[in-house]
Image (cartoon, rainbow, N blue to C red):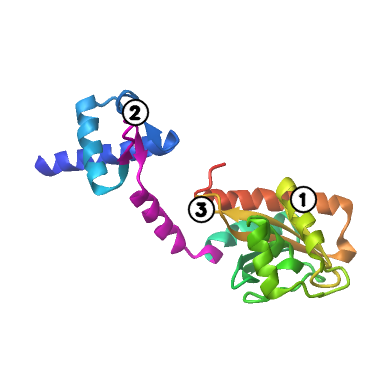
Amino acid sequence: MASEGLVKSAKKIFQILEELSQNGGRMKLKDISNNLGYPPSTVHRLLNTLTDLGYVDQDSQSSDYLIGVKILSLAASSLDGLDLGNIAYNYLTNLRDKTGETANLAINDSNESLYIQKVESKAMVRVFSLIGKRAPLHATGVGKIMMADLTWREVVEILDETGLPRITKYTITQLDEMKSELEKIRERGYAYDNEECELGAFCVAAPVRDYSGRVVASMSVSIPTNRFSKTTKEKLIKEVLIESKKLSAKLGYDK
């Protein structure tokens, strides 16, 4: 019976943490008690335990209970250990199947776009990509998406280090033009490169966010320019936004 009581207490503790999480991470004791249907004395005892362990904090002014930094660090450690490429594979496959084009996932590694996963188009003529391929941030849709999540000062620091080398005749090579480009990306929520990194290739990219809202990767779909049109562009934008949001939700992003 004693062990059964401990299990019930553990269940209540997780219900309290879930209740806090579902209500913005901050609640009053009476609201937790009312929502869960447990006596205030029981909830107070469990909250004291969680507070003592660092999983919950209490605001000294309002007496509200808040999700503690310790539980956030546990979540961060768990997410950091996930194999993002493998997790993304099904979403990239969906993107490839819905568009017929090659789907990619890239991260920012040492101020370069590093492609960590891909699902190839089944078309005879397709944009060829390699897992492990690196490309400049400023010349790729995936790279520009990741730079758009940074402050302008952070972007300038990166570009001071890497420069803005011309990869093709369409590459952005001026700082003021790049600033304008990143502002547009933030407004519309996606990026593209139109033969800026590779002649004959058009790419649309969207952000992949983790539980904190930080952009941790970028999902893209690439199409040969000889198959590109206004209609296909709109479809690529729609589908890459759908799948990138699904992957972000998988990583804990809930907006």
Residue holding disc 1:
184
Which of disc 1 and disc 3 is earlier in sequence?
1
Which of disc 2 and disc 3 is earlier in sequence?
2
Residue 67 tag number: none
Is residue 77 rendered to the left or right of residue 190? left
Amino acid type, mark 3: Leu
Helix, strand or loop under label 1: helix
- Residue 146 seen in this snapshot: no
Whether pointer 3 and pointer 1 mark residues with C-beta atoms closer than 8 Å, the reply is no
- Residue 65 lies, in percent from the top left, at 33, 35
Q: Vertical placement of 69 versus 141: above or below?
A: above
Whether pointer 3 and pointer 2 mark residues with C-beta atoms closer than 8 Å, the reply is no
Is residue 66 rendered to the left or right of residue 45? right
Amino acid type, mark 2: Lys
Helix, strand or loop under label 2: loop
- Residue 184 lies, in percent from the top left, at 77, 50
Is residue 244 rendered to the left or right of residue 169? left
State the residue in front, 226 or 69.
Answer: 69
Residue 251 tag number: 3
Of tags 3 and 2, the one toward the viewer is 2
Q: Quadrant of the N terminus?
A: top left
Residue 147, located in which quarter of the rendered image? bottom right
Indicate whether residue 84 is drawn in magenta.
Answer: yes
- Residue 89 lies, in percent from the top left, at 58, 62
Q: Write the start and end of the magenta stretch as one range.
A: 57-85
Residue 28 tag number: 2
Residue lying at 27% horizontally and 40% vertically, measured from the top left:
13
